[in-house]
Amino acid sequence: MLYCFVCNSKVVLLPERCCAKVGGQECMLAPSHVVSVKSQEGEYMLAVVCDDHKSGLEARLIAMQKENKMPQGTICFQSVKAVVTDCVMGINEDYIELESKRGVESDRKIV
C-alpha cells in the first residue's frame, strides 16, 4: 500500500509502517500521525507513528529537547487519513497526474 501526505500543496510519500521499535521489534502498524517539530527556522518532519506509540514517542521527543539532542520548538502530530485505492501505484504516470493535471507538487522528479 502507498501512503501519501499532502503538506503545503506538496505530496510526500510516507513509510508503510510506524517508526517505533519495541524490544528490538519494529511496529507493523500503519502510520496514523506525521510527527514534526516547528521552530523559528521552519518545520521539520521527524517520523510517522501509529496511535499505539504516539504518547511514548512524544515523551521521548520532549526528553530529547530537554537534553538539546533535537531542535527546540513545538512538537506537532498531524493525523494521516488512510485511503485505500488500487489506482495509485507510485509509478511515474501517477506523479505526472498529480503535478501536471492537478497542480500538486511532489517530492519526486519526473523522468
Image: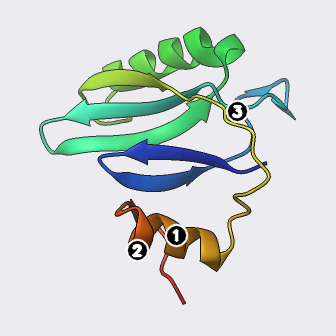
Q: Quadrant of residue 73?
A: top left
- 89 sits to left or right of 51: right
Q: Quadrant of residue 38?
A: top left
Disc marking residue 18: 3
Q: CA distance from mark 3 to mark 1?
A: 28 Å
Looking at numbered disc 1 in the image, what kind of residue is underneath it?
A: Glu
- 65 sits to left or right of 59: left
> Percent position (x, y) of residue 103?
34, 63
Disc marking residue 27: none
- Describe the element under mark 3 as helix, strand or loop: loop
Looking at the image, residue 75 lies above or below residue 7 = above
Residue at far front of view: 101
Per the image, the residue denoted by label 2 is 100
> Percent position (x, y) of residue 96?
51, 75
Looking at numbered disc 3 in the image, what kind of residue is underneath it?
A: Cys
Per the image, the residue denoted by label 1 is 97
Q: Can residue 106 be seen?
A: no
Residue at far bottom of view: 111
